[in-house]
């Protein structure tokens, strides 16, 4: 593998202080009901690690399907996480762009070969994710998303 | 008009210090040649204004068409501009998400009614753009893009 297996951005992730409030603002722009705010990284599928150490950090999120791209608003809860770190050091803003991958290990290895190391990983009932700190090289964090099916 | 006329994100804009360098890094990820770096806001179509005042600020940009979403890397040149301000105050990072609009005036008026004011506007040979400071409400700047055809 010498590249990502897809160049299609599937998600934009925005870190916010108050997900209900920001989700309401987007819903008002789009003329749609506010999506449900849901817990993330808070169940037995989470297994969150941050810089290789288990973390109890969680979040609350709202998802908007904007044509082919999903927008995820994330309010960090607890620490340590890349979400909490971003909010603390940069304030609200766009945290990541996400790409799907079929082979998480190969994708992480490929990015690591370019100096872009995984800083947080975990899962949900249906897949796994990894956040890769590519800020220095790419101007943003990348997220890799693997869907079990 | 009581909403944006499209909820589809068409572009993600990233502010970078060195567009050639960052564009090369993305090209390496995607396994494609580095796109050409092109001047922006530097011709007779530009008519750039920043907070209502004419500005000579320009930029250098590289564009990646990532499926349905375009990624624009922007290196600010000169000041004042929202690009230069972002780099100076936040460093490299994702600056905006863009939506197409057919009626720029109505879209700007709609956003202004929600406290999201246009901070920079201008044009190119083929259309007009407006950056709207929605950071407080939406966690990011929005760009409105109007294509002449």
Image: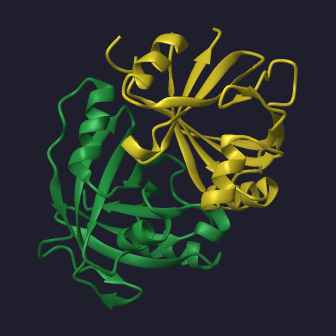
Chain colours: A green, B yellow
Can residue B41 be seen here? yes
Give the image quarter of residue A65.
Answer: top left
The residue under the point 50% across, 46% down is A8
Give the image quarter of residue B91.
Answer: bottom right
The residue under the point 42% across, 86% down is A51
Residue occupying the far bottom of the picture: A53
Residue B68 in the image: x percent, y percent?
A: 51, 34
Question: Residue B38 vs residue A137: left or right?
Answer: right
Can residue B31 be seen here? no
Residue B47 in the image: x percent, y percent?
A: 78, 21
Residue occupying the far right of the picture: B43
The residue under the point 32% across, 50% down is A72
Residue A83 in the image: x percent, y percent?
A: 37, 68
Question: Residue B43 vs residue A46: left or right?
Answer: right
Question: Residue A133 vs residue A58: left or right?
Answer: right
The C terminus of chain A sits in image quarter: bottom left
Residue B49 in the image: x percent, y percent?
A: 72, 27
Frontmost residue, B10 versus A10 = B10
Where is B142 relative to A89, above or below? above
Question: Residue B120 vs residue A69: left or right?
Answer: right
**Could you tell me how many numbered marks the image carries?**
0
The N terminus of chain A sits in image quarter: bottom right
Give the image quarter of residue B61.
Answer: top right
Frontmost residue, B34 versus B122 = B122
The residue under the point 41% across, 45% down is B136
């Amino acid at each position: 593998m010498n590249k990502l297996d897809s160049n299609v951005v599937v998600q934009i992730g925005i870190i916010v202080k108050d997900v209900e409030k920001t989700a309401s603002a987007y819903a008002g722009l789009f003329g749609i009901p506010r999506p449900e705010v849901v817990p993330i990284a808070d169940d037995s599928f989470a297994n969150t690690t941050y810089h290789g150490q288990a973390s109890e950090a969680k979040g609350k999120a709202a998802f908007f399907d904007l044509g082919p791209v999903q927008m995820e608003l994330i309010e960090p809860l607890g620490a340590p996480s890349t979400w909490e770190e971003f909010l603390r050091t940069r304030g609200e803003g766009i945290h990541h762009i996400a790409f799907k991958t079929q082979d998480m290990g190969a994708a992480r290895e490929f990015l690591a070969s370019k100096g872009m190391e995984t800083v947080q990983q975990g899962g949900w009932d249906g897949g796994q994710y990894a956040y890769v700190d590519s800020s220095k090289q790419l101007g943003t964090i990348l997220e890799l998303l693997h869907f079990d099916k």
